[in-house]
Amino acid sequence: MSEITVPTVYFEKPGPQNTDRTLEVARQRAEQLGIRTILVATTTGATGAQAVEVFEGYDVIVVTHSTGFRKPNEQELRPAHRSAIESKGRRILTCQHAFGGVNRAVRKKLGTYLTDEIIAYTLRVFGEGTKVCLEIALMAADAGLVRVGEPCIAIAGTGRGADTAMVLVPANAQTFFDLRVMEVLAKPRLAPPGA
């Protein structure tokens, strides 16, 4: 029986102060495994722009919030960050969230949760970044930007910045249960409920 020992970085607190270290850990593991596809969640584009610098020469896909996520017709990705990402030849994916969309409209209108948001809340038990890593992998697979069944590295965070990174195998949303988390590279330690 063989085993692999991979260090996981646990941050004392979630948040953007962990971005540099998260990107560093993800880059080291990408080099070790020969993984060339990197998914990065971003809201304003700051984390995405930083990631394209760290992952020079990699296939970096930056995944944003959908337009209208916060307010109707508003796109949170700032033009300067969009330019920085696109000037490096990297792709930006803006689409409906895999664990949101129409079902979120049902919750807002009727006050009831449906399956996708229940899955999202369940994944948040491991941290917001864990939920987002899996979600952006589904979104990128559905957009045809990553290959289903081929490992990539997904990077996300809690609120702003990056504090979570994992090696995972993407799946399409309709085959969500085929998605596999292979390695957790970094994540915040979570305080006990009520702490």
Image (cartoon, rainbow, N blue to C red):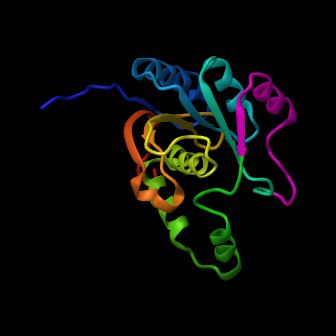
Residue at x 69% of width, y 31% of height: 48
Which residue is pictured at 54% across the width and 66% down the height? 116
Expressed as whole percent of the image width and height from the top left, the position of residue 112 reads 59, 79
Residue that appears at 59% across and 27% down: 19
* On screen, residue 190 above or below 103: above
In the image, residue 86 lies in the stretch drawn in magenta: yes
Residue occupying the far bottom of the picture: 110
Q: Quadrant of residue 181?
A: top left
Instruction: Classify the position of the N terminus by image quarter.
Output: top left
Q: Which residue is outermost to the left?
A: 1
Displayed quadrant of residue 63: top right
Could you say which is closer to the camera, residue 166 or residue 108?
A: 166
Q: At which x and y percent is residue 3?
A: 20, 29
**Is 54 a magenta residue?**
no
- Residue 93, percent from left and from top: 70, 43
Q: Is residue 32 above or below residue 9?
A: above
- Horizontal relation, residue 97 to residue 127: left or right: right
| The one of 102 and 191 positioned closer to us in this rendering | 102
Total labels drawn: 0
Is 68 left, or right, of 191 in this rendering? right
Q: Residue at x 58, y 60 (%)?
A: 99
What range of the chain is rendered magenta?
71-93
Q: Position of residue 130 (x, y in %)?
A: 48, 45
Residue 151, quarter of the rendered image: top left
